[in-house]
Amino acid sequence: MAYQALYRKWRPRSFDSVVGQAAITDTLKNAIKRGKISHAFLFAGPRGTGKTSCAKIFAKALNCTNLQDGEPCNKCENCLAADKGAMSDIIEIDAASNNGVDEIREIRDKVKYAPTQGKYKVYIIDEVHMLSMGAFNALLKTLEEPPEHVVFILATTELQKVPATIISRTQRYNFKRIDQQDLIARMEYILSQEEIKYEPEALRVIAQVADGGMRDSLSILDQILSYDLDVVKYQDALKITGFADQEKIEQLFLSLNKQDTEGALTQVKELIQAGASSKNILDELIELSVQGMLSIKGNQDHSYLVENYLEELKQLPSDNFFRLIKLANEALTDLRFTNQQAIPLDVFIVKMTSMQDHPEVKQADNLNNPDLTSLKKQLTLLEEKVATLANNAPKQVASSDFSGKIDQPHSPKEPVNIPQVSSAPKKPKHKAITDVAKENNRKKVYHVLENATKDDILAIKDTWNDVVSTFRPDQKALLGVLTPVAASPDQVVLSCKYEMWFQQAAADSQLVETIEAQIARMTKHNYGIVLVPADSWQQVRSDFVQSHKQELLAKKLKKLSQDPQDQESNDSKVSSDDKQKIIAKAQELFGDLAHIKD
């Protein structure tokens, strides 16, 4: 007889032999015993956790002629035929290769026929998420109201791809990953039945690599047996799975916590050359950290290969365990996005060995240290003096409290030196929008509009794209919703398209300062930035026009009357040409908001 893989040879034939899914198997057995059989079931969970096995056992039990407490007898004619795959009333369909509408229509046409051998006709559709949307739609009505003699069992590893209309028509059972101890116990049982010797450490490695899948663990075990049929050895398991030797991982863990960068890099290089992968090394370090914490804090027993290893772990600060887990998880994430698998591991080694606190610094944390106590007292006195000076200091009028008049002329346009933007984070100068903040913001906008010039806004608009291009891609997204809408010789109003982005930009003082610096570099002139939400910009501008209409017209009249070309008409009356100039200037400034009345 041809060789049969272990996972096929030792596939469970009864509910009791299914490993790690006791809650599901008990429910299915009770449903059979009580005769409460639903018309459709959905088995979902990771690969190799027993979905298809439970489906076959359940189908066999439904047609068994000699049930044993909800279990199939595995001796009657129907059970023997089901085990051989020769029972016509149990139809297994692979949805990956039969995912079209025609295959589902064929099922729909055949369900009306009664079973020939057993009591139920059972359809097992494996990897049901692979069905096309048309096939799902063709299955809906039949799945909801099948004939009394038909039971559907759907199995999937990707439940999120199954339509909600299908899920709602079934009883759903979620299969979980199998515990490592259960995997090891099952492999021990199979090896004892096969009369094959094994090393317990080898089974532990297999269980860890299988990641909760019984089929994966048996496939790896089969592979090791092909390498050496007589015994399952620990070293063979390391070679085939790419896992690292536990003793070497324990030594690497100590090197990391002793800040021995050179030694840790050397040990990692040896592990890689021995066949271990970066992912497995990081996984084992995380598992060792968790075991170490449980051994120290939870008094749990764990076996270590290095002599007096538990005593070494007890000497380490608790933060070291958490730091290693955090950095190792970050490295595992980086491994997913690079083909250079060694780089994230090397970066992890360097970070872990360079982030430890220096011993002399730790001694300063002692609360009983007299020098530290003296420093704390001095710090407290300084804080009290600063608070007193702040309370007694005269309050200065902020730039946002603009009175409506400009006392000092603006500075001439001069080239500026752009300051280097520090990488250190700064406290945000802009706070969330409140009524007071909105009023102050409105005053700032009024300040700009009262002194707005066409030359300034054109200068900024001409260079705005160049300003945006100097920023990082993530910052460009924020600047993409900013638009220059008005400018005076010393300030520019930027309209922000979204309220949320306005708050974010206003709160990021470092970004605002950088924008000001880039505008200065492009225009050769200093401009302060005033931000305004786009939703309120039109209203603010309209209100400004209404409240400053007379003042603006008077200012333009005065300017025109002092023009040397118009000295002849400098009297109490204004000529029609002057009025036309005023009207044209008002329309230029305010556009459609300017309404001309005689």
Image (cartoon, grey):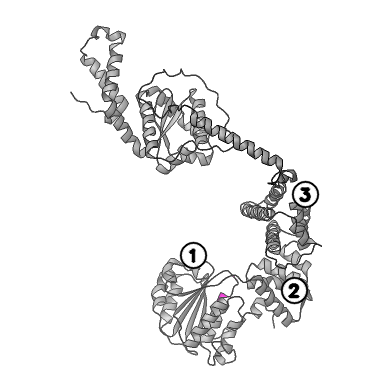
- Where residue 367 appears, as percent x and y from the top left, is 68, 46
The residue labelled by disc 3 is 260
Task: Tell me: 462 left or right of 87.
Answer: left
- Where residue 122 appears, as percent x and y from the top left, is 49, 82
**Is 421 within the magenta?**
no
The three-letter code of the residue at mark 2 reads Leu
Q: Which residues are magenta?
A: 45-51
Residue at horizontal 66 percent and vertical 80 percent from the top: 9
Q: Which mark is residue 225?
A: 2
User: For residue 48, which quarter of the picture?
Assistant: bottom right
- Where residue 487 appears, as percent x and y from the top left, is 40, 26
Question: From where the camera sits, is residue 571 visible?
Answer: yes
Task: Out of 546 and 523, give the one closest to the viewer.
Answer: 546
Question: Is 569 above or below relative to 392?
Answer: above
- Answer few, some or many: residues within 10 Å of disc 3's Cα (few below 14, many 20 plus, some between 14 and 19): some
The three-letter code of the residue at mark 1 reads Gln
Give the number of the mark in front: 2 or 1. 1
Task: Out of 258 and 341, give the one closest to the viewer.
Answer: 258
Name which of mark 3 and mark 1 comes first in the sequence: 1
SS category of the residue bearing label 3: loop
Name which of mark 2 and mark 3 comes first in the sequence: 2
Gap in angstroms between the C-alphas marked 2 and 3:
39 Å
